[in-house]
Amino acid sequence: MTYPNGVIILQFSIKNFFKNQWPLLLAFFIPCTILSIIYIVQGVYPFGNSSLMTVDLGQQYVDFFSYYRQTFYEDPSSFFYSFSKSIGGDMVGLWAYYLTSPFNFIFLIFPKNQISLAITCLTILKISLTGLSFGWLLKKSFNGRGLILVAFSISYALMGYTIVNQLNIMWLDGLIFLPLIAYGIEVLLSEKKGLLYSLFLALALFSNYYIAYMICLFLISYFFFRLLGMTYDSNLSFIKKIKLNLSSILLFFWHSLLGAGLSAFLLLPTFFSLLESKASYTKLTFDWETSFPFHEMLSKLMIGAFNFEQMPSGYPNIFIGSLALLSFCFYFFNRSFPLRERLFGLVLTLFFIVSMNLKAFNIVWHALQYPIWYPYRFSFVVCFFMILNGFRSFMKMDGLRPLETFFSLILLALVGINVYQNEYDFIEPIQIIVTIVFSLLIIFMLIIKPKNYKWLPFLFFLITIIEMGTNTQIDLSRLSYVKQNSFSTYQHLLNADIETIKDKDTGFYRIEKTFSRSKNDSFQANYPSVSHFSSTFEKELPTFFGQLGLPVGDGFVSYSNGTLITDSLLGIKYYISEQNELYRYSLNENNVLDKPPFLEEKKQNKLFNPDFQLSLIQTKPDLRSYLPFKESSKTVIYENPYALPLLFGSDRSILTVESPNDRPIRFQETIIRSLAGLPNKTGLFIPTDFDTTVYQNVSVTHSFKNQSYVKQIFNKEASVTFQFKPKTNDSYYLTLDPDIKEEDVTFYLNGIPFTQYPTYRNVLVLNLAHLNKEDTITFKIALKKSRLSLDSFDLYRLDQDVFSSTIKKLQKNSLTIKNQSNTLIEGAIEIQSDQELLFTSIPYSKGWSAFIDGVPVETKKALNSLLVVPIKPGVHSVSLKYRTPWLKEGIILTSIAAGILTISYLIEMKFSNKSKDKGSYND
């Protein structure tokens, strides 16, 4: 049988491809296979009921990945701005930190309900690509070949840093692009061509600027390290060599600038966003203390040196396997490399070690901010440096001399003894023994390396697979995994409730809940909300919400302590609660307290996990003032009749309102009073006293500012119970000192545990009662420690009549929205004669521009956080448009950089072909 020439050529090409590229294929597929097998053993979805969604991957990234799909498939305008980011926020900075990886396209392939599977596949793909990119570098620049190339590529792909930080999936892009950038530097130095370097650097900056920043710092030292390793023709004069080196240095910095310029369309608006968010927390103070004794870093060289406690605070993850580590150590004694290079390499190694301990250096690596969780995030560049030079050393190594062998064994024993004696909680004695066994095997094989046995490369390869695979298995087995069926059940439940609300109401409103899976549920189910958590959260909003009495921190707000006033102010029109008897009372049409029946038969969805429980974040009795209209077996949906619109007419006095420190009740009252133009004497919150206080096993001491309660008998239960009997059906709120934490006390409302989100830093507002006239309300504080001090512990009643009449007045002057997206709001409004301002619950940003009757109007900032627009009485058309600040300028810079890079490439091609004076390496 004969085949067409085309088929023969194709067969030959495929055969030739596998013959030449099989080491690179193994560098990709071996890590892929190892991870897949371990995921199967661990029962990671789809191989079981565990998912990778733990820690930040479960609390942040998975929701952002859902938003990623929504942006492409449903609303492209949300790329620039989204009302799912708290009450609204710029999204370009969030994209740049979390979502611009080119590999995220995988989320567009999988359906929304299979996002867990997409995450599993993406994790395997990225880690496998790290092996491939490192293997490519070794082959193209360092004569890498065969199974040794594969072994070192596996060491890089499955090093401790990669496995421990695989949950920070967006960081893995940096590990993929670092070898490619290094290859670009090799081409730049050897051929005087910087195109590849600029392109790969730009790609890294585009994919994740945070990790790329660390790469850029590393590249400065790496470039000079490689420059010192170059050798020139002996006939070249010293002056000529200096000129060649200077030209390489200028070329490096020039193409570094061009690489940054290519990504300016993203970096420039991101930088502006950072100034409003993460960068605003930066403090230029340097601590010159070390974090731990230097010898304790040796513990992370042991196999499986990890547990969950190492994630919030631990040692640098520098495990790279015995072959790479020992080869790197012998690099400094390998005379195949110039002495100047080895000495500079030693200086760099010491610098890296100091950087991973000295706090002042560490903070510089982390962009002048100490990391919250995941310490020493830059240690991957140290591992890259060790593995790469370990490979270079191995390829030039002629075995071990007796003296090298002797000192290696002594050093190995000393390290093992040191780690054993320190008794680290993440290292068992068997791990030390296994590490020593692997090291001894590698030392033995290095001794016989000059024999050139054909089976020796395979043995190096096999031992590396076993060692790195074992380390991966141990590390991953020490993580706690979120159950897949719990996630999918919650996802289905939340989506169903949100769709119910959207079917009922097509206008603009915000939705909140008494429960949550994460603070970014709004991204998961695509709805406007208040709660949010990200590293790109604008600083002014947590400050504002904290002043209102909500739990906040650097980068997050949890809407778990809202009042009727904050619900109204922020336009929270719908509230979803768990099924709770506490919320089932309301006033009927005759103004009589009534317990309404179920709205409909509650059906158990077949997708529901029968053991599934909602994670509650608040106790909210004032939900009784809202109208339930839909319920399921797990939840009830309420409509808030007091919700204010997104834009409405208000009094100008809101511009002069300033927040009183730690007085959220007064702040809320002042805001509503100022919006409505009410007299200062108008009171919404009425201070109220507790009727009685019951003490159990405590003594009381009073001071000017607070009261202290001390346990009388330490090992017995102690508590303070405050009681009052409401005289009205109004809402009652209690303010709570932020120094009282979950570890100090347990709260009980009427004998039932009171749910409170545990992390906060401002005075909180707790809701104790609503529609409880003449009921005895008890609020019990059970002491967990020997002493409790109460400050800012005050009870207030919200005057429902004054509140209702004020809100109705403000609702009359709302914007009738005719056209609305994330970046455009258009409508009409009638402003009354006593109003001079258009108030919005949109965060102030320079990106928003306002037009009244088609005429541009300068926007203003109210409450140091919200957008307002001056307006005159009468009927007006209103338009708000959002444009990402500095995006246009960034696009212009990128275009200029692309043009200059093209010209530079053509010039370099011309002169590079003519020049014969080039350096070379002994690799």
Image (tube, grey):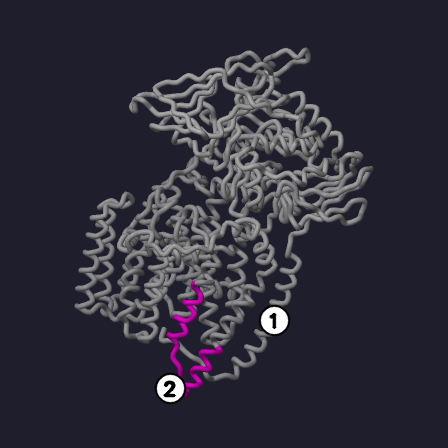
Is residue 180 something that shows in the picture?
yes
- Looking at the image, is mark 1 or mark 2 earlier in the sequence? 2
Question: Would you say residue 77 sits in the magenta stretch?
Answer: no
- Look at the picture and state if 161 lies above or below 650: below
Give, as a single range, the part of the protein colored magenta: 218-247
User: Residue lying furthest front in this view?
Assistant: 704
Say few, some or many: other residues with alpha carbon within 10 Å of mark 2 (under 14 / 14 to 19 / 20 or more): few
Say few, some or many: other residues with alpha carbon within 10 Å of mark 1 (under 14 / 14 to 19 / 20 or more): some
Look at the numbered discs 1 and 2 and tell me whether their residues touch, using CB distance below 8 Å: no
Position of the C terminus by quadrant: bottom left
**Residue 136 point in image, percent of width and height:** 43, 64
Which SS type dominates the magenta stretch?
A: helix
**Which structural element holds mark 2?**
loop
Is residue 477 something that shows in the picture?
no
* Nearer-the-camera pick, 164 or 661: 661
Label 2, on which residue?
234
Label 1, on which residue?
900
Question: Would you say residue 219 sits in the magenta stretch?
Answer: yes
Please report the residue visible at 54 percent of the width from the left and 57 percent of the height from the top. Answer: 206
Residue 902 found in image quarter = bottom right
Q: Amino acid at mark 2?
A: Ser
User: Residue lying furthest right in this view?
Assistant: 874
Question: Left or right of 536: which side holds 919?
Answer: left
**Residue 474 point in image, percent of width and height:** 32, 45
Please report the residue visible at 75 percent of the width from the left and 42 percent of the height from the top. Answer: 826
Please report the residue visible at 39 percent of the width from the left and 44 percent of the height from the top. Answer: 312
* Nearer-the-camera pick, 383 or 510: 510
Q: Amino acid at mark 1?
A: Ile
Residue 650 found in image quarter = top right
- Look at the picture and state if 324 lies above or below 76: below
Q: Label 1, label 2: how many angstroms apart (C-alpha)? A: 35 Å
